[in-house]
Image (tube, grey):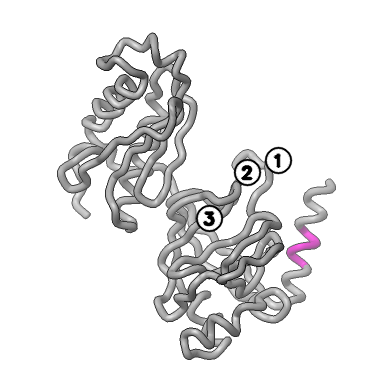
Amino acid sequence: MAEQETYFSADYPVKFYGLSEQSLTIEFGTVINKDLLDLITGFNQHLLQNPFPGFITTVPAYSTLTVFYDPLSVSVFDLVGETCYDKVCSYLKKLGQTKRKQSVAATDKIIIPVCYGGAYGLDIATVAQTNGITENEVIEKHASGLYTVFMIGFVPGFAYMGGMDAKLTTSRKTIPDAKIPAGAVGIAGSQTGIYPMETPGGWQIIGRTPLKMFDVNRSQPSLLKGGDEVSFRPIGIEEFNDYAANEYENQHH
């Protein structure tokens, strides 16, 4: 995509709508792709570097950016508009007309080790049968892809990733599992993701990583962030246990 002159452009016309008295959402489009992700990531970084009085935080998603603010602080903010929503919109629209920076926030390329199938991937047979391929082909196709983290949500640290081979597309479970373990790697529709903690869920589980995907004691609690590029590396049970043992030792020293 050719670089846009501003964050808000004719190519990606934005829409604003209020969520509550303390938040609003900017919709950048209805598609899900890397260009839109870069645009949202860039504007989010620009806003974080140039916050308005009363700004609290943002939550980026596939095609939107939700902005949270303190109405009491915004109410005395010297901007056009009668309501807090109007004032914040006015600020964001003006900010969106500034020239885009050439680069967005730095992204990382992360390799995630995964023990596929068996007790760690009980749904791999379902994915294989649904797509008319073997379980080994599921592993090969999943591990050969390069994925982009489009958003973090559902639970802290849960990364929704796009870029999966279409031949792995599998619907969510009709009845969700009551417990999915931390590190479980799953498929839902055309996306793949990793459960950062034990939680109920309906994704088709094809493997598990021994890496700790979310840790409040880290400077960046979530191992993955929006825009990161992810690849998966198949490992055996012995290597899985070695990783897990090292994680345990690191936490207790």
In percent of width and height, residue 56 lies at 49, 26
Do residues under tags 1 and 2 come within 8 Å of each other at their CB atoms?
yes
Q: Nearer the viewer, residue 194 or 75?
A: 75
In percent of width and height, residue 224 lies at 54, 52
Q: Give the SS element for disc 3.
A: strand
Q: Nearer the viewer, mark 3 or mark 2?
A: 3
Residue 217 is labelled as 1
The amino acid type, in three-letter code, at marker 1 is Asn
Q: Nearer the viewer, residue 11 or 84?
A: 84
Find the magenta span and give its range: 242-246
Q: Which one is earlier in the sequence, the residue at label 3 or at label 2?
A: 3
Do residues under tags 3 and 2 come within 8 Å of each other at their CB atoms?
no
Residue 221 is labelled as 2
**How far apart, in angstroms, are the residues tagged by discs 1 and 2?**
7 Å
In this rendering, position of residue 187 left or right of residue 18: right
Q: Give the SS element for disc 2.
A: loop
The amino acid type, in three-letter code, at marker 3 is Ala
The amino acid type, in three-letter code, at marker 2 is Pro
Residue 137 magenta-drawn? no
Main SS, magenta region, reads: helix
